[in-house]
Image (spheres, grey):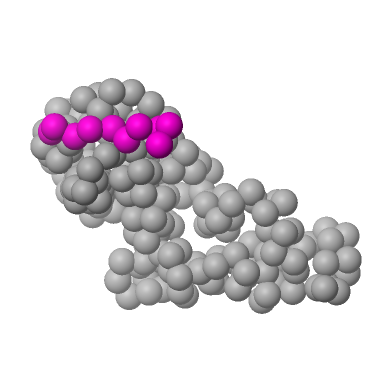
């Protein structure tokens, strides 16, 4: 039995301490390699307390990195349509979030912070791969589902980097609909002929 549950639950600073520990874990080890149990252990709380406060690992990551939105949830909503509509729906969802004057800068700072800490891709990229690629892959049927989902993510990641992080002028100054027109074919080619997974199976 974890004796720390009763000791820490009433502490008003417990949530803040959990977020501090979680942020350090995500930046140091990356999203995929970080576990809820490891965070709970370092924060000296029961792992159930993390689920109570944040519901899921994605929720904890969003809170720890001060993300005002959960990209995975937004993509899930965009995928509630025929697969032929996915390219435009995904791009418009991504652009709407990243173009937001309050949300976008936070997302960019998260990318830069994780990349700097990990000297490369950073935990945010792992997060995109685990949560977003996984959601697209989970909706597709067939043995090529992962390859198709990877192609979709590569195109989206390219848009994010060139428009918001590197700020390549032709991308940074383009309107959202211009970006959709330019990038939609790059996503659509990976989804051509794709079949959706039967949710009842």
Along the line of sight, the residue nearer the viewer: 135 or 112: 135
Magenta residues, start to end: 192-201
User: Residue drawn at (11%, 37%), measured in percent from left and top?
Assistant: 189
Query: Could you tell me which quadrant the N terminus lies in?
Result: bottom right
Q: Is residue 75 above or below residue 2?
A: above
Q: x and y percent of residue 43 in the render? A: 70, 72
Q: x and y percent of residue 131 in the render? A: 41, 50
Left or right of 173: which side holds 93?
Answer: right
Q: Is residue 30 above or below residue 194?
A: below
Left or right of 59: which side holds 190?
Answer: left
Q: Is residue 191 above or below residue 129?
A: above
Along the line of sight, the residue nearer the viewer: 32 or 10: 32
Whether residue 23 is visible, yes or no, is yes
Which secondary structure is most common in the magenta stretch?
loop
Q: x and y percent of residue 93 in the render? A: 35, 32
Left or right of 175: which side holds 108?
Answer: right
Query: Could you tell me which quadrant the C terminus lies in?
Result: top left
Q: Is residue 93 magenta?
A: no
């Amino acid at each position: 039995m974890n004796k720390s549950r009763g000791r820490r639950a009433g502490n008003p600073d417990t949530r803040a301490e959990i977020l501090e520990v979680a942020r350090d874990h995500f930046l140091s080890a990356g999203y995929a390699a970080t576990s809820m149990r490891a965070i709970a252990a370092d924060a000296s709380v029961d792992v159930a307390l993390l689920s109570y406060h944040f519901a899921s690992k994605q929720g904890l990551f969003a809170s720890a990195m001060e993300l005002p939105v959960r990209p995975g949830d937004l993509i899930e909503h965009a995928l509630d349509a025929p697969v032929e509509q996915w390219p435009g729906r995904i791009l418009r969802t991504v652009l709407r979030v990243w173009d937001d004057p309050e949300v976008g800068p936070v997302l960019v700072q998260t990318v830069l912070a994780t990349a700097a800490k990990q000297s490369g891709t950073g935990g945010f990229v792992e997060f995109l791969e685990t949560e977003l690629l996984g959601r697209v892959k989970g909706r597709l049927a067939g043995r090529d589902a992962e390859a198709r989902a990877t192609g979709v993510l590569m195109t989206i990641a390219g848009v994010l980097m060139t428009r918001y992080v590197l700020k390549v002028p032709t991308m940074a100054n383009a309107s959202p609909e211009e970006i959709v027109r330019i990038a939609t074919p790059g996503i659509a080619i990976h989804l051509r002929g794709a079949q959706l997974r039967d949710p009842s199976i």
